[in-house]
Image (spheres, helix red, strand yellow):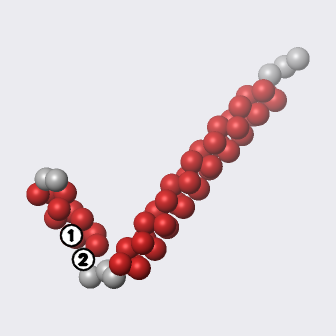
């Protein structure tokens, strides 16, 4: 592990209890999942708009 990684983690997690750090990790994971879902929905909407805009 590099020294910069250590100091980045120290800045992020210093002063937290173990349960708070676990909660933060769970929230970050949930946020990443929601961002992926949103991106998929936006792609689906763009595809639908493109399909509906074509003249038959």
Residue 10, label in figure: 1
Label 2 neighbourhood size at 10 Å, few (<14), some (14-19), many (20+)?
few
- Examine the rendered structure and indicate whether residue 50 appears above or below residue 41: above
| Alpha carbons under labels 2 and 1: distance apart | 5 Å
Give the x, y percent position of residue 3.
11, 57
The answer to which quarter of the image holds residue 45 is top right
Along the line of sight, the residue nearer the viewer: 48 or 32: 32
Tag 1's secondary structure? helix
Side of 40 where 24 appears, left or right: left
Q: Which residue is mark 2?
A: 14
Quadrant that contains the C terminus: top right
Label 1 neighbourhood size at 10 Å, few (<14), some (14-19), many (20+)?
few
Give the x, y percent position of residue 33.
56, 54
Side of 20 where 9 appears, left or right: left
Side of 53 where 24 appears, left or right: left
- Examine the rendered structure and indicate whether residue 45 appears above or below residue 19: above
The answer to which quarter of the image holds residue 19 is bottom left
- Examine the rendered structure and indicate whether residue 21 appears above or below residue 33: below
Single out the residue that lies furthest toward the top: 56
Q: Residue at x 78, y 27 (%)?
A: 51
- Examine the rendered structure and indicate whether residue 52 appears above or below residue 15: above
């Amino acid at each position: 592990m590099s020294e910069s990684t250590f100091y980045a983690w120290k800045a992020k997690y210093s002063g937290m209890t173990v349960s708070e750090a676990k909660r933060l990790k769970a929230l970050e994971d949930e946020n990443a999942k929601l961002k992926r879902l949103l991106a998929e929905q936006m792609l689906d909407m763009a595809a639908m708009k493109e399909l509906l805009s074509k003249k038959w």
